[in-house]
Image (spheres, rainbow, N blue to C red):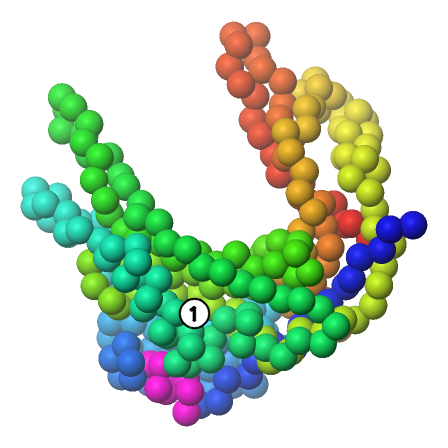
Amino acid sequence: MTTISVARVRPAALDDDRLRALAEAFRIDGDVVRTEEAFALVGKEATLVHGGPGNRLAGVTTLVDTVRGVAATDPEKEHPEPLPAEKALGVTAELTERFGLGPTAAQFDGVRLESTIDATVVQAVRFDGKERTRFAVKTDVRSRVTLDGIPVTGPRAGLNATFLDDGRPLSLMATTWDAVELDHEAELVEEGEALERVLEAARHRKERRGTDLKVVSSVLAYWAAPYEGGADLLAPSWFIELAHSADEYGNDGPKQLVRVGATR
């Protein structure tokens, strides 16, 4: 029998001083709202929100610029060059270290949590009626989090940021935990069994497309789901990508991502 660790996370309840310092760094000078579930500071140009321990997004700090956008305000002008990837990485690393944000700010007990970040300059296409021109529009920073070498994914996993042409993030979303600890060991549902569950369910569908599915890929990962009460666990899951059959014209069928619990 193969087992897998099930980890429990304890979301960080950031104190007012740290959150106000973060808001000050981004020149957010609005009204502060503090409840048991969240802290929010709503400014004229940006909003900062941190989910408290009982919130569905517990431990998640979100910063959103409410004035600027990715689309150019004047399409006739050249789009400004976004922040270089290396500089965006540096700004993000400095922010997370300075304010203690991100999953690896936690204490670990019985598990190995690791996180890396990388940045990518994202391009768009402009069509003037005659030809298409590619141009850079933004720089995205994303983290990759693993627990005992297995990826962690979901709305409360890791960190991401988007930059335009300066060091102020257009958006920033960071999960911060005070602790990540081993909760228990559970029996792992093997990949073959998980695939069979999905395909067996498809066989009972009445629609023709539901009976002719192909497995594109399957990945074992921890699911950092929105908090729903009880112990706050990272759930081992199989993420299975399925492809429906092509239609009568040879067009590829739609694809679907299914999450299946990986423990019993």
Q: Which residues are magenta?
A: 17-23
Residue at image position (54%, 76%) is: 105
Instruction: Give the quarter of the image for residue 253.
Output: top right
Q: Residue most toward the bottom?
A: 17
Q: Residue most toward the top?
A: 249
Work out whether residue 36 or residue 90 is closer to the camera in this orientation and state it.
Answer: 90
Q: Which x, y percent locates residue 139?
A: 30, 53
Residue at image position (66%, 61%) is: 147
Residue at image position (41%, 91%) is: 17
Q: Is residue 20 magenta?
A: yes
Q: Residues within 10 Å of mark 1 (few under 14, many from 20)?
A: many
Q: Which residue is mark 1?
A: 62
Work out whether residue 261 or residue 218 is closer to the camera in this orientation and state it.
Answer: 218
Q: Specify whether residue 197 is in view.
A: no
Would you say 191 lies left or right of 220 here? right
Whether 151 is drawn above or below 196: the answer is: below
- Badge 1 amino acid: Thr
Number of numbered discs visible in the structure rendering? 1
Q: Is residue 188 magenta?
A: no
Residue at image position (42%, 87%) is: 18
Kind of element beneath mark 1: strand
Would you say 182 lies left or right of 241 here? right
Would you say 220 lies left or right of 64 here? right
Q: Residue most toward the right?
A: 1
